[in-house]
Amino acid sequence: MKSLYDYTQGKDLPEKPFLDDDCYGKSILVNVNSCTDCLIINKERQTAFFPVRIAKTGEGFWFIGGVWKARLSARENMAGVFERETSLKISPEKFQRVPFADEDGLAPRTLWPTGRNDMHFFFSIELNDEEIQQVSQNLDAKEYDTKAGLQEFSYEDLKSAGVRDIVLDCFRLAVEK
């Protein structure tokens, strides 16, 4: 069995370490989970596109994104998650950092009855109509409602949809510059 020291020194680590559900569940109860999330925007129309997330614990209109993997920059992680969840390969430098990070202390839920904390690092990207169509048709069925695809929202539309404040804040910073 490896010691903590061995792991921190990078000794004989697997190329892509994997945590099973039990281990991952325990880790998010004691550590802050870092995520990279992306807002697909259209600055000219002052809108953003959102999928309907079905994966626990972030159901509803939410960003495309996921856990920030060790050994990757935030942009590299965002590009990898975006490709995995949408089948669209985009170079990391095209993701624009939204000057906003949020500590999203999730309320206790069935999956994690003690609650958990996430730290989100947000990016935006402006896609052309063809790319938006491709993303909408290729959303990961484990994460998103594939029948709903991407939906376009103005700020007022998002407020009417009752999204969380974190979504509204990110929209204002990314779209209304």
Image: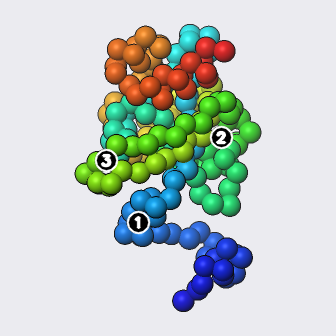
Q: Looking at the rendering, which quadrant does residue 170 occupy?
A: top right
- In whole angstroms, how far apart are the C-alphas of marks 3 and 2? 35 Å
Q: Secondary structure at mark 1?
A: helix
Counting from the top left corner in percent of width and height, residue 48 is at 51, 21
Instruction: Report the amino acid beneath label 2.
Output: Ile
Which of 164 and 124 lies nearest the eye of the viewer?
164
Which quadrant holds the C terminus? top right
| Vertical placement of residue 89 versus 21, above or below | above
- In whole angstroms, how far apart are the C-alphas of marks 2 and 1? 33 Å
Residue at coordinates 40% horizontally, 66% vertically from top-left? 26
Q: Secondary structure at mark 3?
A: loop
Q: Which residue is mark 3?
A: 108
Residues packed near mark 3 inside 10 Å, few (<14), some (14 to 19) or many (20 plus): few
Q: Secondary structure at mark 2?
A: loop
Which of 18 and 26 lies nearest the eye of the viewer?
26
Q: Which residue is mark 1?
A: 26
Residue at coordinates 60% horizontally, 40% vertically from top-left? 121
- CB under 8 Å between discs 2 and 1: no
- Using the image, tell me which numbered label, if any, was put on residue 90: 2
Q: Nearer the viewer, mark 2 or mark 1?
A: 1
Counting from the top left corner in percent of width and height, residue 161 is at 34, 19
Choose the circle earlier in sequence order: 2 or 1. 1
